[in-house]
Structure formats: C-alpha cells, structure tokens
Image (spheres, grey):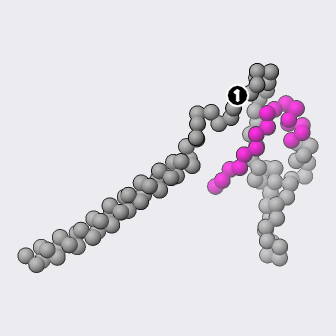
Amino acid sequence: KFKAMAYSETVKVPAAAIDLYLDVRSQIEDQIQGFVEPSSEKLLPDLPPQEQHVFTIVLDLNETLVYSDWKRERGWRTFKRPGVDAFLEHLAKFYEVVVCILIN
C-alpha cells in the first residue's frame, strides 16, 4: 500500500509540471501570435483617388537606408548610407515610399 501511495505521489508531481508547462507554453504562443499576425487585413491605408496609379515601394530601414557599426572605443553608431537622401527624393517622384523595420 505504501509503494502504491508513494508511486501515485511521484506521478502527480511530473503531471503537475507538465500541466504547468503546457499552460505557460499556450500563453507564450498566444503572445507571439499577437506580434506575428497582422493586426488587420490591410497593412496600409488606401491611396487617395488621385494617387491610385502610384505604386508602393517598401524599404527596410536597417542595413538598406542606414547601417549600424559597433566599436569598443565608442559603442554603437548609426549612419545614413551615402546618397540616401537623393535616393529617397528620386523614388518619391514615382512611388509611395514606405519605410519599415524588419526585426529578426
């Protein structure tokens, strides 16, 4: 009888740990879905009627328009790429320019 009681108690602890793990995992997955899934069907608003013919170009800010560099003496510094202002001005003549940040 003692062996059976001891065994049933040892089974309860791992089962409780598994239940806790599954609950925490479910909560974490729900949080991640909030970041992964778009908040709405449309990610950009409609263009005004007079600009319906304009194409949209999406550019990544990091490593495309700016880049960051780290050195031990000064830490992190962020720089605009050479010619980025002229590049954006030129694109703005032909496209709706959207700048985004891609997070790894």
On the rendered structure, is 16 left or right of 8?
Answer: right
Q: Is residue 92 magenta?
A: yes
Residue 56: x percent and y percent?
75, 33
Tell me: residue 86, above or below residue 22: above
Residue 100: x percent and y percent?
72, 46
Tell me: residue 16, above or below residue 90: below
On the rendered structure, is 68 left or right of 86?
Answer: left
Q: Quadrant of residue 92?
A: top right
Using the rendered image of the protein, determine whether residue 68 is visible from the camera's viewpoint: yes
Tell me the residue at 33%/63% (across/down): 18
Q: How many callouts does the rendering have?
A: 1
Q: Quadrant of residue 79?
A: bottom right
Tell me the residue at 81%/50% (across/down): 65
Label 1 environment density (alpha carbons within 10 Å; few <14, some 14–19, many ≥20)? few
Using the rendered image of the protein, determine whether residue 53 is visible from the camera's viewpoint: no
Residue 7: x percent and y percent?
17, 73
On the rendered structure, is 48 left or right of 82?
Answer: left
Q: Nearer the viewer, residue 79 or 39?
A: 39
Q: Give the residue type that dot 1 points to.
A: Asp
**Residue behind mark 1:** 46
Tell me the residue at 79%/33% (across/down): 96
Residue 78: x percent and y percent?
82, 60
Where, quadrant-wise, is the C terminus in this rendering? bottom right
Q: Is residue 56 magenta?
A: no
Residues rendered magenta in the picture? 88-104
Q: Nearer the viewer, residue 72 or 1?
A: 1
Toward the left, the furthest residue is 1
Tell me: residue 91, above or below residue 15: above
Tell me the residue at 17%/76% (across/down): 6
Q: Quadrant of residue 10?
A: bottom left
